[in-house]
């Protein structure tokens, strides 16, 4: 909760330095996810696109800030990361590390890009502004191609590891992956036609690329529309968190109510039985013949 307030304050007070806060935030989140996935043996999730997108963003900020090519890719990633919030039901659930950290690898990157765009448009002379200007000088078709080419770098690496080099190890040790989550946990593979199931990996990669293409148009939207789209994504994030807590507390209340009613019913039944036994004993005492001790 403190992070939400600090993020809002920093964006409003000093958007031109928000990249410093984003860098620290991502360092904490990434280290936390590495530790969590290592403990739970889910480390192949670190190959997911959201981690790649944030790594590219950090590389643009600190290694190649003047690269227009890399900026075009980073800005295009905002689209798929923003779309992932409603599609994957990212929720504002601060007490749950898994849920909140999944959200942190999506929406902060979008806020970082928008804050940098705004700062550069208002006279900031940071090195990143040179990269933004270089990227925007290209035609829209070149910008889209540059973004897609960087995405394909991730896609080729991911497919090579998951479906080729580490496939047998993943199957032997039953490691979880994003592909496995969709194919087996959600049962998407079984929903494919029989002849297509052997190509489920290809279907998964094509589906992911469709998601990227659906969001890549973010880079050609006016800044105002980008801000509105981001606000909508953040509102969905907060709404999902609210629904989670409503459902959580309602279910807890419902469960506790059932337990209370069961306990009360058991006590009433027990008391009723004890009362019946007492009445029978009293009747037997009253009906018994008088004793003659003489």
Image (cartoon, rainbow, N blue to C red):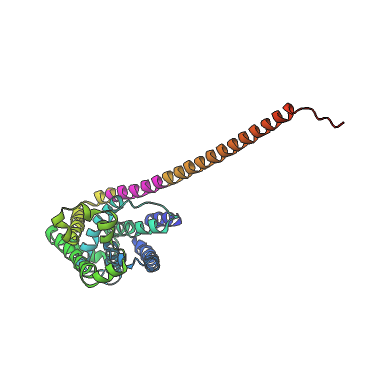
Asked if the stretch drawn in magenta spans residue 226, the answer is no
241 in relation to 153, above or below:
above
Q: Position of residue 138 (x, y in %)?
A: 14, 62
Where residue 80 appears, as percent x and y from the top left, is: 24, 56
Range drawn in magenta = 229-244
Q: Which of the image's four quarters has the C terminus?
A: top right
Quadrant of the drawing holding the N terminus: bottom left
Q: Nearer the viewer, residue 9 or 141?
A: 141
Q: Picture coordinates of residue 112 (x, y %)? A: 32, 59
Q: Residue at x 58, y 36 (%)?
A: 269
Residue 47 falls in image quadrant: bottom left
Front one among 18 and 39 = 39
In percent of the image, x 74 and y 27: which residue is there?
286
Residue 238 colored in magenta in the image: yes
Residue sitting nearer the eye, 174 or 133: 174
**Residue lying at 34% horizontally and 58% vertically, measured from the top left:** 108
Q: Residue furthest right?
A: 294
184 vs 292: above or below: below
Question: Which image quarter: residue 198?
Answer: bottom left
Residue 109 percent location from the top left of the image: 31, 60
Secondary structure predominantly adopted by residues drawn in magenta = helix
């Amino acid at each position: 909760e403190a992070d939400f307030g600090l993020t809002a304050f920093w964006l409003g007070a000093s958007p031109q330095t928000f990249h410093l806060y984003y860098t620290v935030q991502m360092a904490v989140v990434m280290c936390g996810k590495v530790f969590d996935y290592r403990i739970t043996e889910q480390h192949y999730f670190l190959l997911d696109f959201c981690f790649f997108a944030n790594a590219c963003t950090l590389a643009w900020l600190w290694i190649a800030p003047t690269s227009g090519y890399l900026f075009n890719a980073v800005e295009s990633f905002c689209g798929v990361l923003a779309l992932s919030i409603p599609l994957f039901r990212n929720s504002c659930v601060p007490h749950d590390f898994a849920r909140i950290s999944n959200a942190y690898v999506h929406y902060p990157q979008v806020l970082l890009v928008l804050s940098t765009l705004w700062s550069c448009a208002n006279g900031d002379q940071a090195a990143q502004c040179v990269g933004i200007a270089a990227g925007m000088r290209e035609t829209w078709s070149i910008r889209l191609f540059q973004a897609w080419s960087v995405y394909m770098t991730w896609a080729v690496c991911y497919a090579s590891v998951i479906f080729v080099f580490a496939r047998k190890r993943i199957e032997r040790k039953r490691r979880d992956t994003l592909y496995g989550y969709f194919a087996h946990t959600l049962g998407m593979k079984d929903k494919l036609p029989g002849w297509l199931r052997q190509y489920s990996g290809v279907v998964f990669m094509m589906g992911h690329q469709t998601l990227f293409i659906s969001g890549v148009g973010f880079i050609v939207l006016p800044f105002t529309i980008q801000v509105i789209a981001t606000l909508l994504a953040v509102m969905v994030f907060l709404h999902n968190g609210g629904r989670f807590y409503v459902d959580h507390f309602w279910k807890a209340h419902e469960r506790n109510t059932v337990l209370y009613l069961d306990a009360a019913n058991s006590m009433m039944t027990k008391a009723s039985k004890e009362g019946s036994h007492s009445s029978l004993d009293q009747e037997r005492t009253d009906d018994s013949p008088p004793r003659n001790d003489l």
